[in-house]
Amino acid sequence: MPGQVAEKTHRDEVCSRPDSQHTAGPRRGFRPDVEGMRAVAVGSVLAYHAGVPLVSGGYIGVDVFFVISGFLITGLLVRELESSGTISLTGFYARRARRLLPSSVAVLLAVALLAGFLMSPVERRSVAADLVAAALYVVNWQQASLAVDYSAMGADASPVQHFWSLAVEEQFYLVWPLVLLAVVWGCRKRGGRAVRPRLAAALATIAVVSFAYSVHLTQTEAGAAYFSTLTRGWELAAGGLLALAPATRLRRLVRLPGVLAAAGLAAVVISVVLYSDTTPFPGSAAAFPVLGAVAFIAAGAASQETAAARLLGTRPMRYVGRISYSWYLWHWPAVAFAAVAFPGISTTQMVLVVAASWVPAALSHRFVEEPVRRSRFLAPVRPGLALGAACTAVGVALGALTWVTVPTMARATPAQAEGAAALQESTGIQQSASVLRPLPEEANADEGRVYESGCHAGQRDTEAEGCLYGNKDSSTTVVLFGDSHAAQYAPALVPLAEERGWRLLVLTKSACTPARTTIYNRQYERAYTECDAWRKSALERIAAAEPSLVLVGNKDEQDVMRDGGRLGDAESAAAMKQGLVATLEELKGTGAQVRIFGDVPYPSQDTPSCVSASPGALADCAFPLDEGLSYERVGLDAAEKAGVGAVDPVPVLCPEGICPAVIGNVIVYRHDEHITATYMGTLTDWLSGELPEGF
């Protein structure tokens, strides 16, 4: 027994005791250069979001923040581990809660209040869900599931979307101490080996796997990759690995700290200047700024006397770095709300907005962040954890309160929802509505049976399965073929199939043009190869079905890919016409009659949001036809060239050259340029008259 006790004591000492060679992973002294690097990071992000042209890659500032966080937090935890033999999880989480949550909940409160004044009811419902996700620090997964374009601004940009990076860090703070404790436990179980090498091995493994996944996912689903913790974990791990390196060894390895610091800072600045929204990111492109940040921090561990360190260690840089967290929190809501309140705001004006966001940031830092962090009352673990729980609860409550206070309208009965029938009864656009169908908050989900049954193929699908409606044993087969601009006609077409006994085959796929050409997928940010495979499968399926009539739908405005790049607007339109003619001619070869739907006019604003904000002034939500048809009408031109018939929906969408948001108490548009299933359902008689004789 005494021998076993002695062996265990020896293991604990080897795994956890301080060692003169290892105590300076990051040195205990204050690092003004690191605080200055925070200023570079936040300045890059702020300038990028303001739209400053010379910082088109300013989003990499977030990656620099990740490196710094990994470096500082790992050093903090390892020092605690080596001095005490363990890590107080509750103490660590309490300190993080005091440091981060009070300022964030202040921002969430401001967002909830401003949303009530500046946003439509539909937008407020969306913000309510975002507030809850932000308060729970899972907003990055929410945004990844939506594959949001982070560079987007305006009504579609959530005012708390920037919390995604904070969520990544919070998830790191939650998991990383547990990983350290697991490594120490393994160290003690396997003979008492030194803890830092084993921690380095664990971090290196995490970094390699995360980086490989980041490269893979960026190539396949760039939108989701941008927000994923799994694709960003290696950046935090890179900073953590640097924290594990003994300072004495760094000083021996870094022979030219001035050169290394300058090179690291240059890598960050070059990324800010040369990267853009078209750069596949994060992926391999993130390595350049991340390694630049690592190099700069490593050089500073060897010497604080380099020119780069002195530059970033100046008082102005250190001040900006000191308030960087608060300024990051406040700047994006300012940007998002300014875009909502002032559509078409200029870059110069947005720069002023971002600069003005320093005011709440400075006040928040001075009167919220610092007092809470330094409070003796909140210093013990229990009050700190209670504060964190309270802040989280308040954030969730703000989201719930925002949701329940959103006003709504009365739902129109089927008799009140005349839709297209109202076009025959009166002239002019509907000026106001006391009842609506669908309700504005439900309009974007008003997609119809094809979507509800899972018939509409997703972007990942490559095999055209489709669905059958009407009389499945009928000798008359009608096919609806194309993208979502084809699928939107199903609510008018399915009732005709059921009434007339057709065998209706629906073959539609999200964002997939029927034209024989490869297009750019904006969600995945790459060539849409799944569309090419699905189109080939769909055309084979159509030929085998021996149809009597094929109805084709297509979004005219697409970016065509050539030689790995995207063509310009005019070149894309020409390529689309050529590819669509090829498809139409192939369909004619089946012996079927072919008709193509002309694309719908595109609204200039989000229709459900506008209607929810202005039910008594619906004319404000209408738009002129010539503005909605600002693109080339590829489908109609291709139909003429291929010698097939065309169905133009403009007369039933935009009577007398104006495109109303509401017709006969029915909201016309959902999701940008798509027609609601409810309004399309009122177009059955119109569509019947547009079909060839005999159908």
Image: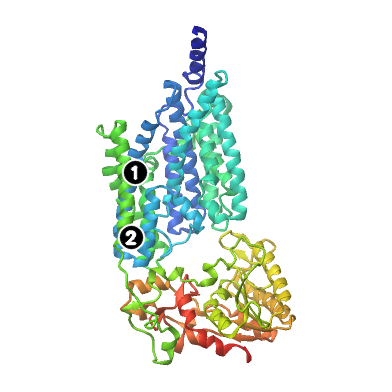
Whole-angstrom CA distance, mark 2 to mark 1, is 22 Å
Could you tell me residue 237's position as x and y percent? 53, 37
**Left or right of 403: which side holds 629?**
right
Pick the front one: 594 or 522: 594
Measured from the top left, where is residue 14 in percent x and y? 51, 17
Does label 2 or label 1 sit earlier along the sequence? Answer: 1
The kind of residue on which mark 1 rests is Leu
Q: Residues within 10 Å of mark 2 (few under 14, many from 20)?
A: some
Most extreme residue toward the top is 2
Find disc 1 in the rendering and name its residue.
101
Position of 315 with respect to 226 (left or right) is left
> Decide: marks 2, 1 in contact (CB < 8 A)?
no
Which of 389 and 293 lies nearest the eye of the viewer?
A: 389
For the residue pair 184 and 257, the one nearer the viewer reads as 184
Q: Secondary structure at mark 1?
A: helix
Whether residue 518 is visible to the viewer of this picture, yes or no, is: yes
Image quarter of the C terminus: bottom right
Identify residue type, mark 2.
Trp
Given residues 65 and 453, the one toward you in this image is 453
Residue 632 % position (x, y): 58, 79
- Residue assigned mark 2: 403
Side (left or right) of 329 relative to 237: left
When asked about the image quadrant of residue 418, the answer is bottom left
Pinpoint residue 550: horizontal percent, then vertical percent.
65, 80
Report how many numbered discs are placed on residues in the image: 2
